[in-house]
Amino acid sequence: MWIIFATIAVLLWGTSETIFKKISTAEKHSVLKLISCNGLMLGLCALIYMLITRTQITFDVIIIYLPISLIYIASMFCTYKAMTLVKVSILSPLQNSSCAITTILCILILKQKISIIQIIAIIVIILCMILLSVNKDEVLKLESGNKEEDERNAKRAYLLYLKGIFFALGYWLLDGIGSFMDDYTLEANLSAEQVIIAFSFIYCFVGIITSIFLKIKEKDYKLLDIKNNKLKWLGTFIETAGQYTYIYAFAFGDAVLASPYIAAYSIVTIILSRIFLKEKLTNNQYLLIGAVLISMIILSF
């Protein structure tokens, strides 16, 4: 059952990540606007979900899940910030190799076991993701004809690239720890329903605070203007749907398998970024994508 939820999460998050990349370079304060919109969307969906499932949530549950939620929200800030600086086709596979941290922690602490072929599949996924992040065209080419100006532009571009990689690694670390803590919490204390509702309300609170800050900074900005913010709301709705399927994938399966499988949603991102964002891929990158897809199939058995 976990493989169904995990596959849906892969498709949803790959799509939402492509949308977020398009938004992140188009507006001022785009990172805060995405956090605000995402939080409000999660809160709204949580209320509807509570009515449908009749799940009860207590303040104690929110307190238990608060540290994990804050880790995830911080990781989202890192990835949104990195999107403004690095191509998403590079960013996504790099930061989603965070499944390596989750897998190692699950084996060492939770004593989860996997087969040799599954270990090989996980290693292949992680290596391919790292190799997919290598793209020499990310730094601006020297084009002006003025050597000194070219050197300054190249240096500036490289520093911005490194800044983006720094935020991507922030996501890598935080998401890996958060995914492990999710699996530990689901096995020890909370149900999948309680986890997603608690996370949604905590993120919603952060979204409301961020919305107030944005209103102070940009008095004319109207987040609830759906017509002018349709991409934000569409992206956050798809992202939220992915959050729900992600939690159920962990509830029905072990994070040691689910984490690297779901992390491969970067493959969807890479394909969509090529189609809609015109980010080009090399033949070697296509081969790496194929290796990840085969490894995902191996993990499903």
Image: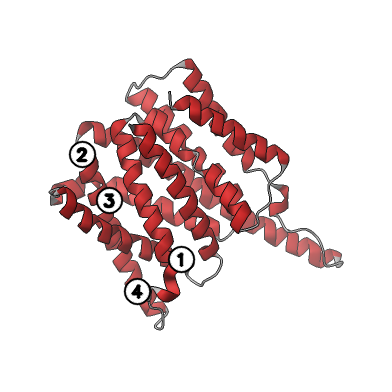
Residue 219, percent across and down? 39, 83
32 relative to 44 in the view: left or right: right
176 or 282, which is in the foreground? 282
Identify which amino acid the numbered label 2 is placed on: Ser
The first of marks 3 and 2 along the sequence is: 2
Mark pair 3, 2: CA separation: 12 Å
The first of marks 4 and 1 along the sequence is: 4
- At 37% across and 76% down in the image, what residue appears? 225
Say the numbered circle drawn on residue 199.
3
Please tell me whether mark 3 sits on a helix, a strand or a loop.
Answer: helix
Identify which amino acid the numbered label 3 is placed on: Phe
Q: How many marks?
A: 4
Mark 2 or 1, which is nearer the eye? 1
Q: Dividing the image into 4 quarters, which one contains the C terminus?
A: top left
Say the numbered circle drawn on residue 66.
none
Residue that mark 1 sits on = 231
62 or 14, which is in the foreground? 14
Identify which amino acid the numbered label 1 is placed on: Leu
Identify which amino acid the numbered label 4 is placed on: Leu
The first of marks 3 and 4 along the sequence is: 3
Residue that mark 2 sits on = 191
Mark 1 or 3, which is nearer the eye? 1
Position of residue 162 relative to residue 8, above or below, is below
Crowding at dot 1, Cα within 10 Å, few <14 / some 14-19 / many 20+, comes out as: some
Residue 283, percent across and down? 72, 40
Residue that mark 4 sits on = 224
